[in-house]
Image (spheres, rainbow, N blue to C red):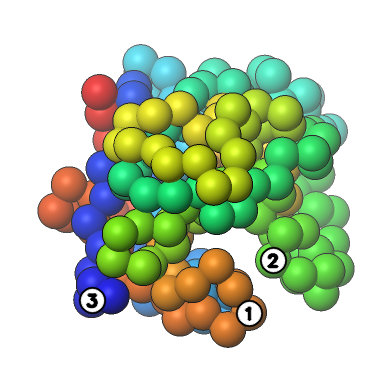
Amino acid sequence: MSTTLDLEYPFTGRWLTQNSPANRVPSHGTPRYASSFAIDFVPVDESGHSAAVTLASLLRPEPAVRFPGFGRLVLSPVDGVVVAVYAAETDHAAFRGLPSIGYALTQARRAAAGWRALAGNHVMIRTGGGNVVALCHLQQDSVPVEVGQRVKVGEPLGACGNTGNSTEPHLHVQALSSVDVMSASAVPITLRGGLPRNGEVVTAG
């Protein structure tokens, strides 16, 4: 298996980088679930912003459809074979401001429920080198591929959603040594040979 797995960007358009392993490892504050080198991307508009923050958004949950990236196409970052698909979870509201505090208090419960509760709807692809790439938080019922299907770079895998451990629509990407998340090791990744840092807006396509 490769020491570092180089991926294509799994989207087109403009996306804001968060929780990048270019800034720290483990990137999400924990090595659990082989997530040490995971990275998040938030779809943004042409000005580089997600949904505007209003007084209402600071006080109560917001519909996921209010965000510019909800439903934006997610593409395969590798050639490989689909080894896992889950797409039945309902997209939940987004949480910013005060609602995010209450949501954070429920994170331990999701973590105790296992990786699927954190990942939400997802697709996992095994590469020719044996590593597995996971793309998570996809929109409910948006996944057109199935287990055993061979996919190519750039092939549609689903849509950006707000499922699993997610406060607003975004895409979580990680690579691991096997499809068994509980026993797998985290695999370092690059994207087109590099890694964007937190706060960097990536334009792909």
Q: Which amino acid type is shown beneath numbered disc 1?
A: Met
* Residue under the image location 70 percent in, 46 percent down: 86
Mark sitting earlier along the chain (1/3): 3
Residue corresponding to mark 2: 115
Mark pair 1, 3: CA separation: 20 Å
Q: Quadrant of residue 17 in the image?
A: top left
Residue corresponding to mark 3: 3
203 or 23: nearer the viewer: 203
Q: Is residue 67 left or right of residue 49?
A: right
* Residue under the image location 23 percent in, 76 percent down: 3
Q: Which amino acid type is shown beneath numbered disc 3?
A: Thr
Residue corresponding to mark 1: 182
Where 54 falls versus 9 (above or below)? above
10 or 131: nearer the viewer: 131
Circle 1 — which element?
loop
Where 99 falls versus 204 (above or below)? below
Is label 1 in contact with label 2 (beta carbons under 8 Å)?
yes
Mark sitting earlier along the chain (1/2): 2
Mark sitting earlier along the chain (2/3): 3
Residue 73: x %, y % from top left: 48, 24
Circle 3 — which element?
loop
Q: Is residue 119 left or right of residue 110?
A: left
Q: Which amino acid type is shown beneath numbered disc 2?
A: Trp
